[in-house]
Amino acid sequence: MNVRKSKPWNLPESAATPESDYLNRRKFLKAVGLGSSALVGGSIARAATAGFPSAKNDNYLLRELEPTDFELIAGYNNFYEFSYDKGEVQKLANQGWKTEPWTIEIAGQVDNPMKIDVNDLIKKIGGIEQRIYRFRCVEAWSMVIPWDGFELSALIDLAQPNSKAKFLKFTTFYDPKSAPGQKGGSIDWPYVEGLTLEEAQNELAFLATGIYGKPIPNQNGAPIRLVVPWKYGFKSIKSIVKIEFTSKQPMNTWQALQPREYGFYANVNPKVDHPRWSQASERIIGSGFFSKRKETLMFNGYEEQVAHLYKDLDLRRFY
Amino acid sequence: MNGIARILRKRWLLYFLLCSPVFIVFTPYIQSDTEFRADPAKYLLDYVGLAATYIFAIVISITPLRRIFPKSGIVNSLAYHRRPMGVSVCVYVFLHFLIYYFYTGSWADFVKDWEKLFILSGILAFAFLLLMAVTSSNRMVRRLGARNWKRLHRLAYPVLFLIIYHQAAQEKTGFRETALIFAPVLALQCWRLVLASKSFLARGNDSSNEIE
């Protein structure tokens, strides 16, 4: 039922699951609309973060779960910078919004601040790997996504935080000309998210630059986004331009907007309801009208890896 | 009566229009929509709820429109269809309720959610609409007597506020969509109240019962 049972990182390399077991290759090729030759040849080299080989990290494969179809991952998006309508984002995020070249700034309480091109950053980190994570939205739906990218802790090592660094503040791009949603509405753009340094150093915290071995589509947060799989999806901020190490807890966008409904931590927790709906269960994207819900797992099934971070925290108060 | 008003009075056209949201579900417009395929229950839940909201917004505006434009043929044709339109709101809300059951996936979860104000407001609106729908026939008007019947059907106003709350509560940020639908509705209601108070003042204390 969850990762604890299989402890995948204890398996010998010989037991690694072949690709076909978690990925219906034909279905995927059809979904991305590419022939196999295009896939091997890597013909979409124009996107940022293209051209980095991504090997599966056997420690983070969810063998018991089927990844969501690429088409649904790329077509069902909350990205209010473009639209409130999940079905419209894909179109609007691909009408001239440039995600290449892309510079990301690392700043704040660090010994090694930098402004760096995202491709150079990947080279500096030493490449990317693939991990399959559960993705649970605060709106009570979920996907299973094969991300490509690198551990956030690798970037932290690069930045060398000093003793005053306690939090990481992430900021999304701001470009109302390309992102019509940023022209107005009740949100104070650009979108901001935050983690404690300890959370950011957890092995699961990930910076994604791809999905299914391809550069991440614009609507999914190109060219680089955060993935914190034990938290609700809104914590996994998209299209990051700045990571600042701070001594004070940053105010994240959703908390600023509705503090009664969204907190700083936003850990997936089936026992703490959203004021307007239950978080005890979730709808699985792509499973159809009559499918039953899946029970939501504590910390989205990653209790073993992250529960120790919150042992002194009242999760009802700090939702 | 002009041409448009005459066509609008046709019952078959009314039934066709009232059913058209259901037909649209089976067209490629929705069937090929990624949002529909990602989570059909959630999509249809919102879709049917919105259909009910739009029809309700029209029905509730008929009385003020009649006060403001008493001679308009189009408004009078709409008024002619008021009861079947009202019943269709109840039907769509029933579908919304039914789909919500499938959306939650189990009876226990379905009932557990009722304690949330957001869900409760919808359930209450459905209960009031049901009361009005079952008493919508001519026979029921006669049985209750015109005065009682009208009194009962003023439940439409509590329903208006329940729907506004329910609609606003489902929006994640702000109240844009709700305002877009209901600002005109509330403006018409205010206008009607202004007209009513004017005629009341004009007639001095000699106020006949000006309630429709």
Image (spheres, coloured by chain):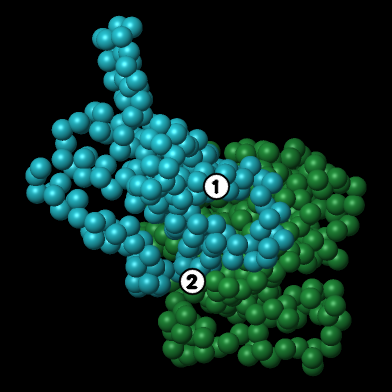
Badge 2 marks a residue whose secondary structure is: helix
What x and y, as percent, mark residue B89? 41, 51
Picture disc at residue A258: none
Residue B28 in sight from this viewpoint: yes
Q: Residue at x 28, y 48 (%)?
A: B81
Q: Residues within 10 Å of mark 2 (few under 14, many from 20)?
A: many
Look at chain A in the picture and name its colour.
green
Separation of residues labelled 1 and 2 (CA atoms) = 31 Å
Q: Spot the residue most to the front.
A: B143
B201 vs A267, left or right, is left
Residue B23 sits in which quadrant? bottom left
Query: Residue B177 or A241: which is nearer the viewer?
Result: B177
The answer to which of marks 1 and 2 sits earlier in the sequence is 2
Q: Residue at x 43, y 82 (%)?
A: A33
Q: Front-most of A290 and A149?
A: A290
Lateral position of residue A83 relative to residue B66, left or right: right
Can you say whether B203 is above or below A151 in the image?
Answer: above
Q: Position of residue A150 (x, y in %)?
A: 68, 68
Residue drawn at point x = 62 percent, y = 70 percent: A284
Q: Which chain is cyan?
A: B
Q: Which percent across, then down, holds residue A93? A: 42, 59
Task: Provide the residue designation for mark 2.
Answer: B37
Q: Amino acid at mark 1?
A: Ala
Foreground residue, A156 or A219? A219
Q: Position of residue A157 (x, y in %)?
A: 76, 59
Quadrant, the N terminus of chain A: bottom right
- Which dot marks residue B127? 1
Q: Residue at x 46, y 79 (%)?
A: A32
The kind of residue tagged 2 is Arg
In the rendered image, residues at marks 1 and 2 fall on the same chain: yes
Chain holding disc 1? B
Vertical comparison of B68 with A22: above or below = above
